[in-house]
Amino acid sequence: MDLFRKKSISHILTHLQRTDHSLNKVLGAKDLTMLGIGCIIGTGIFVLTGVAAAEHAGPALVLSFILSGLACVFAALCYSEFASSIPISGSAYTYSYIVFGEFMAWILGWALLLEYGLAASAVASGWSGYFQGLLGGFGLTLPPALTSAYDPTKGTFIDIPAVVIVLLITFLLTRGLRESTRVNNIMVIIKVVVVLLFIAVGVWYVKPGNWTPFMPFGFSGVTAGAASVFFAYLGFDSVAGAAEEVKNPQRNMPIGIIASLAICTSLYIIVSLILTGIVPFTELDVKNPVAFALSYIHQDWVAGFISIGAITGMTTVLLVLLYAQTRLFFAMSRDGLLPKTMSKVDPTKKTPIINTWITGILVAVFSGLIPLHKLAELVNIGTLFAYIVVSIGVLVLRKTHPDLPRAFKVPFVPVIPILAMLFCGYLIFSLPVATWIGFGMWLIMGLVVYFMFGYKHSELGKKDKGLHPPEALEEKVH
């Protein structure tokens, strides 16, 4: 079995120019940056910071964010080289198809499906919690049976707010990418303003004594915290997945990826310093640490704005994650590894509408019915795995395609890709054994799907066997 058949870069670029089923090129550098910020700032800054400080890192949480940020910066440089050279949907999945072949591409694509799907479901659940809190502030409540995932012992059946927000965002995505990015840009501005408001108010209440002891759990606590808050950095790889819908991707892709990551890392570092400076880290084990910190210093009027910022923040995260999931389905379906229905593009909206609704309904079911708190770390392992593969891919592509036009090149090769592998590898091995077991079970499921469907229906396999129609062969000659 030819498991390692590879895509030709020239064939991909020619296909993109000739196909009538291409996506609409509407995104610029600003849109990509806002898309990245929209996905990165959300659950991480508004939810995870408190637990990571209280249980893992203490005031050294800032070092955890720096450690995770470095891993992402090195990986982001590698993504930028690929995205500017091969501007096509699928992100790390497509890059692997070119460099390592179909089998590795499938494994990576399957891992990314886990990342986007579980992350979107988890964020929807978090959104529901904040939304219910906001309703409670106005004296409104929903029936308990309809506000949490299915749990017979607690008498809960479905998380209706989580289901509704997922379906609403799915509807927005079906209207077209231009409309979706406009909504995303407005919400990103709101949540960044809210974060800056927290910084402007909170900085005056910092007590340096709260930073002592700085590293109460030792350096192992810092690394455990880094692995935990890594969830906060999910998002810049979804920018790479938008490459096929970008105007001038050679210039705009690197700007969008690097700028969004740089802005978010800076905000994370400042917020974590102020947060642990305001509240003793032992008291931060709460679901809404930023709002809690403001209540702690009796600035309740700002805490209300924080809740609004958290809701808009998680809404944009959900939007970008669902978008990234649909584009990954689109790329894998176009290659024949998933059913062709997933890559049908609406001729008017220039967006895969059927695919989008299938994605939205699946995520709505997961977020509404299944408690996902025990599965959150599975998201991290899938992402770290993708970052490691892309970093290796840069080194391989430099050897196999030295003359490929590269609008952006990773500096200091091979040092930067090796650092990305080392940092991500260190974080991935800091994850619990249970996470590795769960990830292994997911990959086994993926292998079953691949050998029962993907391998037989692969477009590349059909081409190799001469099963394509004459026009496809003509396209190959071009």
Image (cartoon, grey):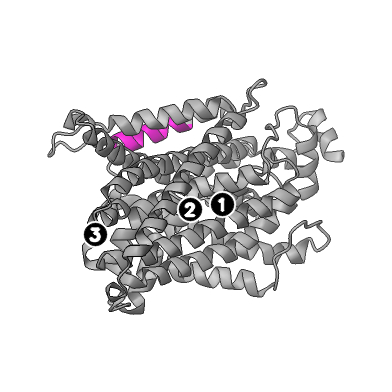
Q: Residues within 10 Å of mark 2 (few under 14, many from 20)?
A: many
For marks 1 and 2, give the CA distance. Answer: 7 Å
Q: Which dot, 3 or 1, sits closer to the camera?
A: 3
Near mark 1 (Cα within 10 A), the count class, few <14, some 14-19 or many ≥20, is many
Q: Amino acid at mark 2?
A: Leu
- Badge 3 or badge 1: first in the primary sequence: 1
Residue 449: % across, % down:
49, 41
**Is 360 part of what is drawn in magenta?**
yes
Residue matched to label 1: 237
Label 1 near label 3: C-beta < 8 Å? no
Magenta-tinted stretch: 359-369
Residue 203 appears left or right of 416: left
Residue on which the image places disc 3: 285
Taking the view exactly as shown, the residue that stands out farthest to the front is 204
Q: Residue furthest right?
A: 478
Q: Is residue 2 left or right of residue 370?
A: right
Q: Is residue 401 above or below residue 451?
A: below
Regarding mark 1 in the picture, which secondary structure is present there? helix
Q: Which residue is mark 2?
A: 234
What is the distance, in whole Å, between disc 3 and disc 1 at their CAs?
A: 29 Å
In whole angstroms, how far apart are the C-alphas of marks 3 and 2?
22 Å
State the residue at coordinates (53%, 72%): 422
Kindly indicate the quadrant of the structure image that contains residue 168. Answer: top left
Residue at the location (21% across, 63% down)?
Answer: 283
Ranked by sequence position, the earlier of labels 3 and 2 is: 2
